[in-house]
């Protein structure tokens, strides 16, 4: 009887040792996670239907006015790296001669026949211009082609910018938004300036 109890205890001990050995081997052989390079957010490249906003966190999609600028990685001063990234990653183009000359002004445009133009100056994104073929909406819900009266319903603070009867503006904190209307008073351009 004593011998049977000892045999059972030895088998139990062997089973425990085997289990501990297997668990140890499992953790010892487990691979460390593979480090992946830093990836931009999925919505890094601006899209034609991204929302533009100026009431809160002014910007366009992933991009923010006065914060997307020099990232230091490409050795290009004051905003150039971000403009270059938009060109190389997203297929955008330099606007006219805004390639970082005097004052380090960078301008890049894209989104199907110049639907959007981003401009950097002094190291930060300071202007976004959206043209008639942009397909997004503003944070309050207006879009290109809306009438002046439709937009005034969403933006009662909209004021006329004299001497032009087709140019209206909104000032929010340090952000100036200008809206240009065509001859039928339909929205055809939005200019957001920080």
Image (cartoon, helix red, strand yellow):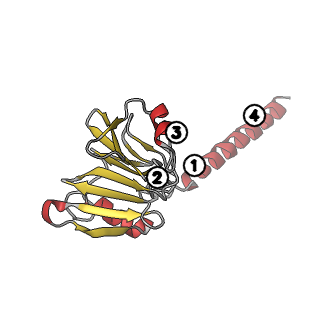
* Mark 1, secondary structure of its residue: helix
- Position of residue 134 measured from the top left corner of the image (x, y, whole percent): 48, 56
Q: Earlier in the sequence, mark 4 or mark 3?
A: 4
Give 118 or 79, whichever is nearer the viewer: 118
* Mark 2, secondary structure of its residue: loop
* Mark 3, secondary structure of its residue: loop
Question: What is the spatial separation of the Cα atoms under label 3 and label 2, in whole angstroms?
Answer: 24 Å
| The quarter of the displayed image where residue 31 is located | bottom right
Q: Earlier in the sequence, mark 3 or mark 2?
A: 2
Tell which tag, 4 or 2, sits nearer the viewer: 2
User: In the rendered structure, are the residues bearing label 3 and label 1 in contact, judged by CB atoms less than 8 Å apart?
Assistant: no
Q: Residues within 10 Å of mark 3 (few under 14, many from 20)?
A: few
Tell which tag, 1 or 4, sits nearer the viewer: 1
The quarter of the picture where the C terminus appears is: top left
Question: What is the spatial separation of the Cα atoms under label 1 and label 4, in whole angstroms?
Answer: 27 Å
**Circle 3 is placed at which residue position?**
141
Residue drawn at 44 percent across, 60 percent down: 115
**Circle 4 is placed at which residue position?**
9
Question: What is the spatial separation of the Cα atoms under label 4 and label 2, in whole angstroms?
Answer: 58 Å
Question: What is the spatial separation of the Cα atoms under label 2 and label 1, in whole angstroms?
Answer: 33 Å
The tally of labels here is 4
* 92 is higher (above) or lower (below) than 181: below
Residue drawn at 43 percent across, 53 percent down: 182
| Label at residue 41 | 2
Residue drawn at 69 percent across, 46 percent down: 18
Question: What is the spatial separation of the Cα atoms under label 4 and label 3, in whole angstroms?
Answer: 75 Å
Q: Earlier in the sequence, mark 4 or mark 2?
A: 4
Q: Residues within 10 Å of mark 2 (few under 14, many from 20)?
A: few
User: In the rendered structure, are the residues bearing label 3 and label 2 in contact, judged by CB atoms less than 8 Å apart?
Assistant: no
Question: What is the spatial separation of the Cα atoms under label 3 and label 1, in whole angstroms?
Answer: 54 Å
């Amino acid at each position: 009887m004593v011998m049977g109890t000892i045999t059972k205890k030895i088998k139990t001990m062997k089973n425990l040792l085997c289990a501990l050995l297997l668990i140890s081997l499992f953790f010892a052989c487990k691979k460390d996670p593979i480090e992946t390079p830093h990836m931009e957010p999925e919505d890094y490249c601006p899209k034609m239907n991204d929302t533009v906003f100026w009431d809160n966190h002014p910007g366009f999609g992933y991009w923010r006015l006065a914060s997307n600028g020099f990232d230091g990685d490409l050795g290009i001063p004051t905003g150039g790296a971000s403009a270059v990234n938009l060109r190389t990653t997203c297929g955008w183009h330099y606007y006219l001669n805004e390639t970082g000359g005097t004052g380090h002004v960078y301008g890049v445009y894209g989104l199907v026949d110049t639907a959007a133009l981003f401009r950097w100056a002094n190291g930060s994104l300071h202007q976004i211009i959206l043209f008639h073929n942009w397909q997004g909406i503003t944070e309050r819900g207006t879009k290109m082609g809306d009438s002046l009266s439709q937009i005034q319903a969403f933006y009662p603070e909209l004021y006329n910018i004299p001497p032009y009867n087709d140019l209206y503006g909104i000032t929010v904190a340090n952000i100036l938004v200008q809206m240009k209307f065509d001859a039928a008073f339909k929205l055809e351009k939005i200019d957001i300036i920080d």
